[in-house]
Amino acid sequence: MDAAHRLKRLRFRAWHRGTREADLLIGGYFDVHHASWTAEEMDWFETLLEEQDVDIMAWAIGAAAPPPAFAGEMMNRLCTVNYIKHPE
């Protein structure tokens, strides 16, 4: 699968999580950061999407520590939570 098709698929999965809060958190993260991702970073994000939304949200707001597999710069960017655009 080429990178453009893969990113399109990841965007859909990021924005269709099942709750509006998770859509804004995970989809917003995707929208802000995906343009510069390497193949390894896409792998990381794809793996993250397999996790439960409640866990991802807890890691992002600091209510729980992320597993070692998710630790690093990508998680640090997720934890800034300054990329969420709230619809007015």
Image (cartoon, helix red, strand yellow):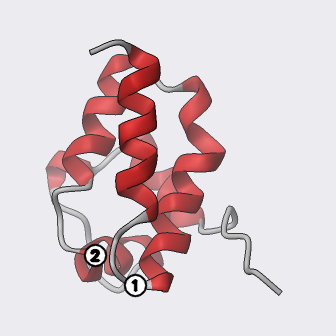
Q: Position of residue 22 (x, y in %)?
A: 42, 76
Residue 13's place in the image compared with 55, above or below, is: above
For mark 1, does the 10 Å Cα neighbourhood hold few (<14), some (14 to 19), or many (20 or more) residues? few
Q: Are marks 1 and 2 in contact (CB under 8 Å)?
A: yes
Give the mark nearest the N terminus, 1 or 2.
Answer: 1
- Reading the image, the residue beneath label 2 is 53
For mark 2, does the 10 Å Cα neighbourhood hold few (<14), some (14 to 19), or many (20 or more) residues? some
- Residue type at mark 1 is Thr
Image quarter of residue 38: top left
Helix, strand or loop at mark 1: loop
At 34% from the left and 54% from the top, the residue drawn is 13
Q: Position of residue 26 (x, y in %)?
A: 46, 63
Q: Position of residue 24 (x, y in %)?
A: 55, 72
Q: CA distance from mark 1 to mark 2?
A: 9 Å
Which residue appears farthest toward the top when viewing the image? Answer: 2
Residue 19's place in the image compared with 39, above or below, is: below
Q: Is residue 73 left or right of residue 36?
A: left
